[in-house]
Amino acid sequence: MRTPDVHLKGLGVYLPPAAGVEQAVREGRYSAEEAELHELAGAAVAGDVPAPEMALRAAQQAFKRCGHRPEELDLLLYADSWHQGPDGWQPQYYLQRHLVGGRPLAVEVRHGCNGVFSALELAASYLRSPGRRDALVVAADNFGTPMIDRWRFGPGYIAGDAASAVLLSTEPGFARLLSVCTTAVAEAEEVHRSGEPLFPPGPTAGRPLDFSGRTADFNRRAMADGAGTTVWVTVHQRMVELVDRTLAEAGLEIGDIARAAFMNYSREIVEQRGMLALGLPMSKSTWEFGRTVGHLAASDQLVSLDHLLTAGELRPGDHMLLVGVGPGVTLSSAIVQILSTPPWLR
């Protein structure tokens, strides 16, 4: 989806201190074998700070950095992956009460780790309507709860806590969203639920979240059925095709990409399934940063963007590729062009 005249005006992040992998190994929460294989260094841990409070702090920072008035917002999209608060309640209203007020349409986006990409597409479409100027996309998750083990979250990744926020506007900003695309590999739908019943839902029956176990079960069944790794080959091919489409919509080639942010996964996944597949060197990835904070659910890419800007590793004229993978299996990508140094870094 081409996104003409959609700018990034503000960017905010809430990233708590990280707990180290070495300590987790000493305490028996993470295996030494996995630590050596995946080369991950730590995971951001928010303690008992609720995810909606984290989202609020990231959003406040985004508004403060660009000097925009929160009450002038037209749309609020809140992306999340894990439980946010009491059942029957939705977290976007917490931000309405404490920051933006009741004027904007506020919606929760439950699209897993690709929630920010989906929200970007929805926001860009919304801003095409006459009189619509500003949209806030936020994402937040705190995985320090019962029924989930951040150190055994999934194959090749550990879970970190974080929140991110980006203010989109039809007015000029420090960067421009050139294109954002999403597709699904429908035949891989069962990957993230394999081996578990659809009803009753896991949390209501006291079943913990175990992506490692579900993925292993899916792979075992695929081998037994004779399908083998076919579905993973398809996922890989679709990702490359999706990035090619995103580049084409932006009028770019892969050589025009200055930096690329994938999910904060293990080195072998980011390198073999991501960077090399696209013809990009690891030096252009954000893996060295991502390995220190863990997989931040839907916030991986925005937090990486904030890190690169703050570190001075993105300059005006640079293009950044964002790529995500989520349950579905869904694949998403977006391209951001840096137009100027953000006002809070001048």
Image (cartoon, rainbow, N blue to C red):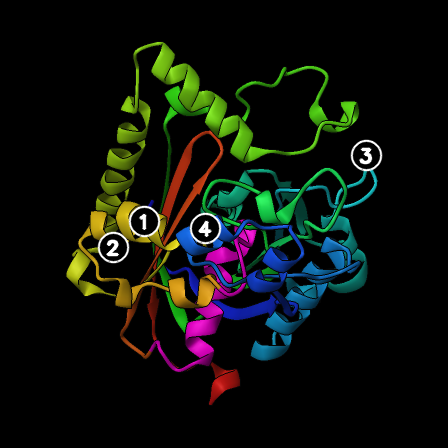
Q: Tell which tag, 2 or 3, sits nearer the viewer.
A: 3
The residue singled out by tag 1 in the image is 2
Q: CA distance from mark 2 to mark 4?
A: 15 Å
Marks 4 and 1 close (CB-CB < 8 Å): no
Question: How far is mark 2 from mark 3, CA to CA?
Answer: 40 Å
Which amino acid type corresponds to the residue marked 4 in the rendered image?
A: Ala
Identify residue for label 4: 124
Q: CA distance from mark 4 to mark 1?
A: 9 Å
Is residue 336 depicted above or below 230 in this figure? Answer: below
- Disc 3 and disc 4: Cα gap in Å? 28 Å
Q: Return the x and y of residue 61 as percentages of the image width and height.
A: 64, 73
Q: Earlier in the sequence, mark 3 or mark 4?
A: 3
Q: Nearer the viewer, residue 112 or 154?
A: 154
Element assignment for label 2: helix
In percent of width and height, residue 39 lies at 42, 58
Residue labelled with disc 3: 88
Q: Earlier in the sequence, mark 4 or mark 1?
A: 1
Which one is earlier in the sequence, the residue at label 1 or at label 2? Answer: 1
Q: Are marks 3 and 4 in contact (CB under 8 Å)?
A: no
Q: Which residue is mark 2?
A: 250
Residue at horizontal 74 percent and vertical 55 percent from the top: 52
Segment colored magenta = 292-314
Q: What percent of the width, then of the height, locates residue 4?
A: 34, 56
